Structure formats: structure tokens, C-alpha cells
Image: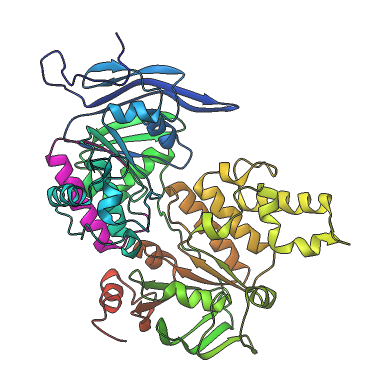
Amino acid sequence: MKQEGRSDGSGATGKPRYAIRMMGIAKSFPGVRALASVDLAVRPGEIHAVVGENGAGKSTLVKILAGVHTPDEGRIEIDDAEVTISSPLIAQRFGIRMVYQELNLVPDLTVAENITLGRMPQRRGLFDRARAVDDSERVLGDLNAKLDPNELVGNLTVGQQQLVEIAKAYLADPRIIVFDEPTSSLSEHEAAALFAVIRTMRARGIAIIYISHRLREVLDLADTLTVIRDGRAIETRAVEGMTPQDMIAAMVGRELADLFPKRGAPIGQIALSVEGLGRRGVFSGVSFHVRRGEIVGFAGLVGAGRTEVARVLFGLDHSDAGTIDLGDRRLVRLTPIQARRAGIVYVPEDRKLHGLVPSMSVRSNLTLAIIGSLSRWGWIGARRERQTATSLIRRLGVSPPLPDRNVSTLSGGNQQKVVIGKWLATNPKVLLLDEPTRGVDVGAKAEIHQLIGDLVEQGIAVVLISSELAEILAVSDRTYVFHEGRITAELSRQDATEQTIMTAATGEVAT
């Protein structure tokens, strides 16, 4: 007999073999087969990673577990008892908690108030602040998370806010916690703190489902791995002994000899030259250049000033000192419109917040930056707009190739192609790419780098900002390393290694 909203926690032997077991799960949406007979089983005290390309079905699977979607076929068991999860509230009653990439916190409330939100302790009908602080201190202590319960969440770093989100889930005494891309916005130090908390939860018998595109952290953290491809579970095995190449081959169904392929392109004259650029309190004395057909990497720790420099180059912020020359033209007090007209474009690190208009179609997003040239007397030429968008979709390999589809329905990798394509329509001279492959799967990464290779072959100068050292090392012709708002090293392709970059990024040496 199925249970809804309750699990007695006992299997046939009195001790459940699996905390969660999903068998033969199938789910279809109009025109799309999202999942086809997927199995997933996670034991108590196990970290089980789920990996796959964007659109493979990972999110659909965990949303079924969370009660957001109802499966068309299959069964779910919790603690070896079959259950029906018909809503998020029912999932929570079974002890299932989700920690999403987008945090669900209230910045104007304290850590304690956020942790107890939804189950705030009361005394005589009023919020019992002292007990909330005590409960939060207990939970944070259990997780070895050093946070002040009285601090406003809005004052915390993203990594600290992630710990608050986890503590909030932990307070509910969960059986199963799902982490969906939890480190996408974290520094290495913050990610290490998060991993320590996750391992503590594993030691306390909680079943953990971990979704990530970062293959090495999966290998370091997980006990077991399930690979999903095209809506099917391809493989489930122990992580021990696996390599990133094994995972990539299973995820994409083909060997990727090099995740970040580097193609030779003729390097021409200097396209962009920056001297002594500064913005008070943010960065200072920044000097660099990038040539036509060259990829220049910006490396450094989170907050080192790389993004802030790119924002000034695109006119989003203004500098207090220094010069910017585009070829032989001096650019002064730039605005984004002036930068675009000059030939400098910027793909921001947060594509959903700053790169796309989610409510609009793929076609409208692709032509947004050139809408003036497609208009006459205030009317958009629909035929020219569709022709332009269709050409860009074909050039970029956007999938599915449907101009009128809402852009928010695309996978992360295809959304990123649309953001890049919007600026390619302007025929830029300099392309500033800020974390262009963050949060996309390995197949999409290779496709985006193939696109970047095409662009530099056409003579476009590329500045690549990335927190992934493998990406910087693989594709950059030269690398500038930032530390606390200054460039501490300029490295040739031959001299750039993980060691030389990290040494400069931590301020240990200036070259």
C-alpha cells in the first residue's frame, strides 16, 4: 500500500537498505520525452552524484523527487516503503529537502531568522528570538559552520549564504538532501567549506544527491555516480577509480580528447590597449593589451577585480584614471551604447540576470542589440528580423533551432550561445567573455570553445575571464593574473601553469 506524507522509516529487516529508491521513472512534456525508465537508489549516509549534459533529464528527475512534477510511470520508495509524492509539501513531510543553485533567503533577516523561517519558534503567540538563536547555534555547530546567528544574511558572502540555506534544510531533520549546482558561484575556499559541511551530513546518515558540472569536485566528494544521457540512466557505479575522461565519455556518448580545444589563429595588430586604468576602491594601475585573433585570459581569485575591469571597458562603470585605446582611437567616458558602437561587447557572468530577457523569444533576444538597424519608421521588419535570427541560430548551433521559442526554455549552454550571438550580430572588434562556460555541461563547453575559436580566426580579439584554471590554460594565448585589484603577472602560453597562476593570484609574486 502506498503512503502519502508519511514514512515509518523501517524496512523488512528493521533497517532500510535505501533512503530513496526511484524505479522506472518516466516523464514526458508536450513534444519532449524528458525521462525514460530511470532508476536511482541512494543509501543512508551516501553522497550520490548525478551528472549529465544540460537537458539530459537531471532537473526533471529531482523535481519529481521534490514533488514539483508527477511521474508518468514508475515508483518511488523511501526507507524501503512505496510512497506517492504529489506536492512539495508531501516531499518535505517525507524528509526531502532541496538546496538549489538560486538561494531562497531573505537578505533583510538575520541568519537565525532565515534558518528558522517557516518553523519559527513562538512564545505566547510571538516570535521567540532567543530560541531561534539557540536552535540556529545548535544546527550551525552540528555542521561546523562558523556563522553569527544575529548577522543579517545580506551582509554575508555567497558561500556563507549557501551554508545558511543548508542549515535551514538541516534544521528540519531531513532524510534526503538534494544539492543542485551548489558551487557554481563559490570561490575555492568557500567550496571547500561547503564540502566539509556535506561530509558532516553524510557522517550523520543523511542521504545526499549531488548535481554538478564540475567533474573533479564530483570525483573528490561523491561515493557513487549515476550518469544520465538523453533521459536515460546510462551508468551507475562507484566513483573510486573513475577519471574525468570516463565521466565525459559516458555523459556525451563520445570521446572528447580535449574539453577546451585550442586552434591556431593568426594574431594581428593590437586591437585594445589599456594603460593605468583605475576605479577608486576597486582596482588600480591596470595595464594590458589584446591583439586581433588573440585570446587573452584574465585569471585570479573571486573579487580580484577582473569583472570590474570588464564593466569599465563596456561602459557600465566609469574609471577614475587611465586610458582605453581601441586601435588608434582614444575612448573617453564610455557608455554601453558608445562601447558597442566602437566595437567592444560584453557577455556578463550572470546570463539570466544581465544577458537575456527571459520573457522574450530566441529571435527577439538575438536581434535585441541591432533592433535599430532592423527597424524603419519605428516598425520592426519582421522578415529581416527572422532571417537574421535564423542565420545566427544556424551559425551558433542553437538547439532546438526554433526562433519563436521562449529563450528561458533552452538549456544553459544554448542560452549562453544566444547571449554571445546577440553581440555577434553587431560585428564586434573586441569580445569580453565573463565566465562563458559557468553552469554548462561538458558538451556545451566544447561547443562554446569551438565558437570562440571561429571568432578569433575571423580576427576578433577575445578577453576571457574564467575561474576555471583548466579553461584559462587550455585556450589563452597570454594570461594576466589579478590580485586585489592589480595585475600581478603577465604570462605567456608557455609560462602559464596552475602553479604560476595561483602563486600570482594569491599575491606571492609580481611578475
Identity of the residue drawn at 45% across and 58% down? 261
| Residue at the top extreme, as displayed | 1
Nearest to the observer: residue 65 or residue 142: 142
* Relative to 212, residue 453 above or below: below
**Residue span colored magenta:** 184-210
Q: Residue 154: x, y in percent? A: 35, 61
Quadrant in the picture for residue 318: bottom right
Identity of the residue drawn at 26% across and 60% down? 190
Identity of the residue drawn at 13% across and 51% down? 141
* Relative to 19, residue 49 above or below: below
Nearest to the observer: residue 166 or residue 302: 166
Left or right: residue 26 versus residue 377 is: left
Q: How many marks?
A: 0
| Residue at the front extreme, as displayed | 124
Identity of the residue drawn at 36% across and 51% down? 105
Q: Is residue 191 magenta?
A: yes
* Residue 297 in view in this figure: no
Q: Quadrant of the N terminus?
A: top left
* Residue 349 in view in this figure: yes
Q: Residue 307: x, y in percent? A: 45, 72
Q: Residue 324: x, y in percent? A: 56, 87
* Relative to 261, residue 81 above or below: above
Left or right: residue 261 versus residue 315 is: left
Q: Quadrant of the C terminus?
A: bottom left
Q: Is residue 265 magenta?
A: no
Q: Residue 313: x, y in percent? A: 55, 78
